[in-house]
Image (cartoon, helix red, strand yellow):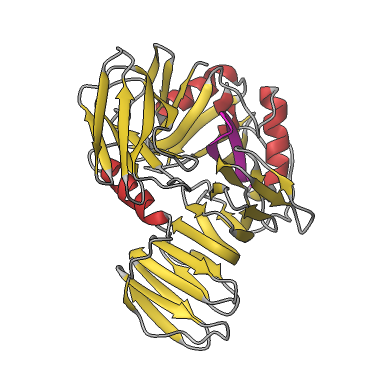
């Protein structure tokens, strides 16, 4: 039912005012409260996981808050505590790819992983007096109270521009003073106050041998000696599950309980890695334990979990874990069966995306030719449908009109569509839309 959106929208609406690129929303994840959002320059209000962040909105974490915003292509910006940013632009093309995005960072620390951009696309983070521009990379920006901007590049390349220009390569950092004077690049310097080092290590540890898009991250409140935190990861089977715990120092323990009751446990220096081969289907309970040396303030753990799963057509529901896999043929057959007057339907799914899927379609409806594209993303345990464009009679149709038509066609709110279970992950791999989730 939900994939009627591939052909819905704009068929009855003709409008030549559509822009070449459309604004889409980012999705907020709150790892630790409190995080607030200010819409279009308004007052800040507390927000929760699944909230939408539009161009012109600002996001702020307090002294304990940790959060992230994710674009539909999988580009992810993490916010440390005491951080404030504004999403200035977030445009996607009519074909569903990122066209340009810009963030202004007012204060604090962010870690951004930018997915590979198509030719001509841009992603920028601006400080008080300098701008970092990247293409498909991972980098950190730290804005101090006086406006000093420090940029650390972990992967790829980066242009750093203020009163002068500096080009960074992986493993380098550079600093712009409050007036925009950028110093020479040098190796990344250790920083005990930087919360993103353990996060990078844990995430990298689970990436190898797992399927892009299956990773879920959890940021816990500061742990003290003897404290324990618990998290849940859904997995419908088919390969292995990897969990990694990163933390600043001291000693912690990671325990993973499989759906069969078997417990896997490991302790040691960060990052701790637990690997479960031939992992059974079901819900996995993960426990993070503070062992010793965590101090009175405690230490913040970062837990990354990923899995290997086949990117094929599937309809699995085992021990409360759910997996739905849809090929282009699956979508075409579903839409054709449920839509009279439709002919010559062709559906295409973008090859891969770690967060969301780009689905395009073309065909004829009662003899009228059309083309269209939508973005599907997980949002707050449900699915959000974002239309990025359609053409009828060769004329562009605005995305908002498409969304309205989608809602009429499916009888639900396209921004909060429930498939009958809690959606944990939605991604594309090997031209298949994968939806992973669980029954609660």
Q: Which residues are magenta?
A: 375-393
Write the residue at 49% across / 80% down. 176
Main structural element of the magenta stretch: helix, strand or loop?
Answer: strand
Let me know if residue 63 is in the magenta part: no
Q: Position of 410 compared to 250: left or right?
A: right
Q: How many marks?
A: 0
Q: Position of residue 330 (x, y in %)?
A: 43, 23
- Image-based side of 302 in relation to 29, left or right: left
In this rendering, is residue 430 above or below 15? Answer: above
Quadrant where the N terminus lies? top right
Kindly tell me whether residue 392 is visible in this rendering. Answer: no
How far across and how far down the image is residue 314, in percent?
37, 20
Residue 137 in which image quadrant: bottom left
Q: Position of residue 16 (x, y in %)?
A: 72, 54
Task: Return the residue nearer the eye: 201 or 314.
Answer: 201
- Foreground residue, 264 or 152? 264
- Asked if 163 appears above or below 68 in the picture, the reply is below
Residue 387 highlighted magenta (yes or no) = yes
Q: Is residue 121 above or below residue 359?
A: below
Q: Residue at x 59, y 66 (%)?
A: 107
């Amino acid at each position: 039912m939900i994939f009627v959106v591939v052909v819905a929208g704009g068929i009855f609406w003709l409008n030549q005012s559509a822009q070449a690129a459309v604004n889409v929303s980012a999705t907020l994840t709150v790892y630790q409260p409190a995080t607030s959002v200010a819409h279009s320059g308004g007052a800040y209000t507390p927000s929760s996981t699944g909230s939408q962040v539009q161009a012109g909105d600002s996001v702020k974490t307090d002294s304990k808050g940790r959060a992230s915003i994710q674009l539909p292509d999988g580009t992810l910006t993490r916010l440390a505590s005491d951080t404030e940013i504004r999403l200035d632009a977030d445009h996607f093309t009519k074909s569903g790819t990122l066209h340009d995005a810009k963030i202004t960072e007012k204060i604090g620390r962010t870690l951004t992983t930018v997915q590979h951009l198509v030719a001509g696309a841009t992603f920028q983070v601006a400080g008080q007096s300098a701008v970092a521009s990247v293409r498909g990379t991972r980098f950190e920006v730290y804005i101090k109270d006086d406006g000093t901007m420090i940029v650390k590049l972990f992967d790829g390349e980066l242009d750093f521009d203020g009163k002068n220009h500096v080009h960074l390569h992986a493993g380098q950092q550079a600093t712009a003073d409050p007036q925009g004077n950028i110093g020479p690049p040098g190796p990344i310097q250790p920083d005990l106050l930087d919360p993103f080092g353990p996060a990078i290590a844990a995430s990298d540890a689970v990436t190898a041998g797992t399927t892009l898009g299956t990773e879920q991250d959890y940021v816990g409140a500061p742990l003290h000696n003897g404290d324990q935190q618990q998290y849940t990861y859904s997995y419908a089977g088919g390969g292995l599950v990897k969990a990694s715990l990163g933390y600043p120092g001291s000693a912690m323990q990671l325990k993973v309980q499989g759906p069969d009751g078997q417990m896997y446990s490991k302790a040691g220096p960060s990052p701790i890695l637990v690997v479960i081969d031939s992992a059974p289907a079901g819900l996995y309970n993960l426990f993070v334990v503070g062992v010793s040396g965590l101090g009175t303030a405690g230490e913040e753990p970062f837990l990354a979990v990923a899995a290997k799963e086949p990117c094929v057509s599937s309809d699995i529901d085992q021990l409360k874990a759910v997996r739905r896999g849809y090929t282009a043929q699956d979508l075409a057959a579903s839409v054709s069966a449920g839509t009279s007057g439709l002919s010559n339907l062709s559906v295409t799914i973008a090859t891969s995306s770690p967060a969301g899927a780009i689905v395009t379609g073309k065909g004829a409806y009662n003899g009228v030719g059309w083309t269209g594209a939508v973005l599907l993303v997980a949002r707050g345990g449900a699915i959000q449908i974002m239309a990025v464009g359609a053409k009828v009679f060769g004329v562009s149709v605005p995305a908002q009109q498409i969304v309205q038509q989608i809602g009429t066609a499916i009888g639900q709110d396209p921004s909060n569509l429930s498939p009958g279970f809690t959606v944990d992950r939605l991604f594309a791999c090997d031209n298949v839309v994968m939806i992973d989730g669980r029954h609660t």
